[in-house]
Image (cartoon, rainbow, N blue to C red):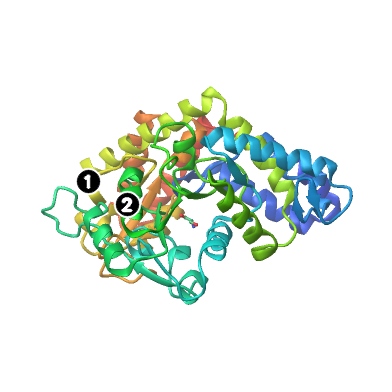
Amino acid sequence: MSHDPIADSVLAFLRERDPEAGAILAAESERQATTLELIASENHASPAVMHAMGTCFTNKYAEGYPGARYYGGCVHNDSAEDLARSRARQLFGCQFANVQPHSGAQANGSVFLAMLKPGDTFASLVLADGGHLSHGLKVNLSGKWFNPVHYPLHYDPGHPDFERIDYDAVEEVCRTHKPKLLMCGYSAYPRVIDFARFREIADNCGAVLMADIAHIAGLVAAGVHPSPFPHCDIVTTTTHKTLRGPRGGLIMTNDAELAKKIDRAVFPGMQGGPLMHVIFSKAVAFGEALKPEFRAYQEQVVRNAKALAAALARRGYRMTSGGTDNHVMLVDLRTRDAELTGADAEQWLERAGIITNKNGVPQDPRPPKVTSGLRLGTPAVTTRGLKEGDMETVAGFIDRVLGAKGDDGVCGAVREEVRGVCGRFPLL
Ligand code: DSN
């Protein structure tokens, strides 16, 4: 038996038919059930969302869009995709939604394909400051085929907006480089994004304004972070982070002409057959997100993040930008211990059952595989039911492990206590 009913129902089939695969699933199920997941981009999807993915919709080719497919037999696939699209529109208050992108990177790539020609300039925040690899990293298609220019944060520690977006500098970068597309929305940025200010800047330089809200989508859907609509022309997101759906992407707009370009870019431009089982599951997840309890969940995510940041700050850790407004925090480990690296911290914490990811802090002198920071987020532990008071306990676990520099005995002792917390806050 594993620790969750979804895995158990699959294991019932695999036990005899494919025990080798079954053993891998049982182990992953056990790992998720008995560890505290603090990776800001991960979550625990509901049984309904996970079950919806494991259905006969995986058997179907449905290239095209509802009512205009290239294959027969799509009648119920049309219903599933229409349901997902209409719920996405309702959730985010917009007029057009494309639910086919397989991932956030594919959603962003589709927007580039729709809006830019190779060599065109776009403006974004660089990965090292909290952006994403699909926002112009040189090794990614976005950086190889297009011309990214990056706007800065405030890097002066004496500035009141230290490590927050320098909106005047965004304006300056856009005035100088005249990007065709201006991107906002980030993967490691703990503060509220001023979409209205980005709109003004985009208007001043004639750029299309795109927001990648992959991290904050759940907060936006619940009204806990300001919406990119009506300010942004195009909004992309993933569906599996704070939104707590299946792994996938989504693109939205209020502009009918842009919607047509985006649809053509996703299919046939970027992708072939849509993952209909995932689209069906997206519909289920969006239905969950439309319920009042989803707002309460997102409010708790933010309260927990603030509590965890404060509890770590009391133990000598510096949060970049001084704290968090959303679900994520970037912990600068050097204030606790100048020698401590993100790579070591990630490994030591994993041995204690606390799952995190190393992450550069702005202007980090260490390389990306080492880093001086840890990125922490509260969506997954909040799904388990942990509250503000429990964040003090979690901060204490983290500090014991890092203070002892990953000592085996300390990691082992914390591992047992983490199992205890997981037992008190079970999944599903
Ligand atoms: N890898 C995701 C994250 O962790 O933020 C973004 O794609």
Compared to residue 174, the image places residue 331 above or below, namely above
Residue 369 in the image: above or below residue 131: below
Using the image, tell me which numbered label, if any, was put on residue 322.
1
Q: In this view of the protein, can residue 165 be seen by the observer?
A: yes
Q: Which residue is mark 2?
A: 330
Residue at image point 56% right, 62% down: 114
Tell me the amino acid under the disc marked 1.
Gly
For residue 364, which quarter of the picture?
bottom left
Amino acid at the residue labelled 2:
Leu
The answer to whether marks 2 and 1 mark residues whose Cβ atoms lie closer than 8 Å is no
- Left or right, 316 with respect to 278, comes to left
**Most distant residue in the top direction:** 292
Residue 171 sits in which quadrant? bottom left
Is residue 46 among what the camera can see?
A: no
In which quadrant is the C terminus drawn? Answer: top right
Q: Position of residue 230 (x, y in %)?
A: 44, 40
From the image, which quarter does the N terminus lie in? Answer: top right
Q: Earlier in the sequence, mark 2 or mark 1?
A: 1
Q: Residue furthest right?
A: 72
Say few, some or many: other residues with alpha carbon within 10 Å of mark 2 (under 14 / 14 to 19 / 20 or more).
Answer: many
Figure disc tally: 2
Label 1 near ligand 1 (CB < 8 Å):
no
Q: Secondary structure at mark 2?
A: strand
The residues bearing labels 2 and 1 have C-alpha atoms spaced at a distance of: 9 Å
Q: Residue at x 36, y 45 (%)?
A: 195
Picture coordinates of residue 154, whole percent (x, y): 20, 57
